Amino acid sequence: KTMRGILPCVLVVAIAATSGVLAEPSCRDPSESDYEYYRCFNFSSPADFSTYLVRPQLRSDLTFVLKNSKLSHLPDRAFSQINATVLDLSNVHLETFSLPGENPFDGLQSSLRKIILSEGSTIPTSWAVFSSLQQLKTVRISEAKDLVLARSFNELPQTVKVINIAFSDIAHVDEDWVSGLQNLEVVGIRHCNLKVFHRSMFPRPARKLWRLDLYKNNLTSLPSDFSVDMPVLRSVTVEYNQIPTFSEETFAPLAVNEANRVRLIGNPLHCDCKLRFALSYPPSWLSAVCETPEPLNGQPLKDLTEEQLTCADGA
C-alpha cells in the first residue's frame, strides 16, 4: 500500500523533470574535454545573464550556446566579456529580440564570426541589431517557423559571406532579400519550402557568389536570368524541387565551363523539344531523369537523343 502511494509521486516528479518544469537556469563552464564550449540553459529572464554567466570568458575560439530558454528579450550587452567566435541560440524564444536603443551584441564586435539560430529560435524582425559585428562571416538558421526572408537581411554587415537556412518554413521572401550584401560567397536554402526564386534577391552583379544550394524546396520554375551577372558562380544545386523545365538562358553562363556543376536530380522533368539544348551540357549535369512524356519516363537525360525530345506539334 505504501509503495502504491509513493510510485505515482515519483512518476509525477520524473515527468515534470523531463518536461522541463523543474529546470533551473544554469551555465556550464568549459571542461578539459569540452574546452571550446560555454553553455547556458533554461534562462527565463534577461536578469539571468548577469546572475549565471561567469565573466570574463576570454579563451580563443569559444562557442557560446544558450539553449531551451524563454524570456522577454536579450538584455543590453548580454554577451560582454564573452570572447565568443560562435553564438548559438538553440530553442530560444523571445517576445522581442532586444529593446529599443539596446544592443545585446555590444562587446562581440571584434570576435563573433558566426551566428546560429536553431531549433525554432526567435528570428529578429530587423537584422540591424547585428550591423556592428564587423567580423561576422556566417549566418545559419534552422528549424524556423514562418520565416520571412526580409530585405532587412541587407542590414547585416558587409563582412557576411555565408547564409545557410535549413529545415525551415518560409512564409515570405522579399524580391530584394540579400541584394545589398556584396561579399556573399555561399547561399544555401535546404530542406525548406521555398516556392519562388527571383534574380533580384541577390546582388547584381554578385561578384563573389560561387555556390547556390537550393536542395529540396518547392520551386516550380527558374528565371531565365537565374545565373546572369554571377561571374564566379560554379556550383548550383536545385535537386529535388518541382521544376519540369527551364530555358536555355537559365544556366547558359555556367555551361561554358565543364568544371562548373549544376545538379538537377529529383525534378519532374518534362523531356520535350524545349530541352534539346540541354543535351550539349556536360554529362555530369544530365543524371536527372525524365518524368514525362510517358515513353521517356525514368530515362536519364544523358541517354537521350535530339530525335527523342519531341513536342506535340511535331517539332
Image: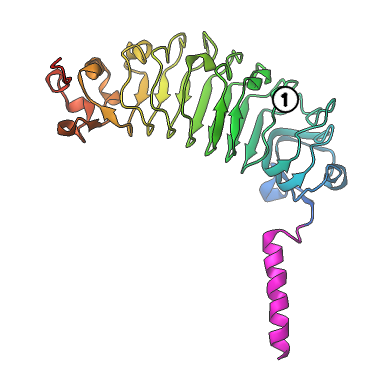
Residue at the spot 57% in from the left edge and 41% down from the top edge: 143
The residue carrying pointer 1 sits among few (fewer than 14), some (14 to 19) or many (20 or more) residues within 10 Å by Cα, namely many
- Tell me if residue 305 comes above or below residue 9 in the rendering: above
User: Along the line of sight, which residue is nearer the eye, 272 or 7?
Assistant: 272
Residue found farthest to the bottom: 1
Residue at the spot 72% in from the left edge and 70% down from the top edge: 13
Magenta residue span: 1-23
Judge left or right: residue 197 versus residue 179. left
Q: Main secondary structure of the magenta part?
A: helix
| Amino acid tagged 1 | Phe
User: Along the line of sight, which residue is nearer the eye, 35 or 8?
Assistant: 8
Judge left or right: residue 107 versus residue 115. right
The x and y percentages for residue 85 are 70, 32
Does any portion of residue 279 appear in the rendered image? no
The quarter of the displayed image where residue 281 is located: top left
Judge left or right: residue 127 versus residue 308. right
The x and y percentages for residue 136 are 67, 24
The quarter of the displayed image where residue 16 is located: bottom right
Task: Name the quadrant of the C terminus.
Answer: top left
Residue at the spot 52% in from the left edge and 24% down from the top edge: 187
| Residue annotated with mark 1 | 130
Does any portion of residue 196 appear in the rendered image? yes
Task: Name the quadrant of the N terminus.
Answer: bottom right
The x and y percentages for residue 307 are 12, 19
The x and y percentages for residue 112 are 71, 29
Residue found farthest to the front: 313
The answer to whether residue 119 is magenta is no
Judge left or right: residue 23 versus residue 18. right
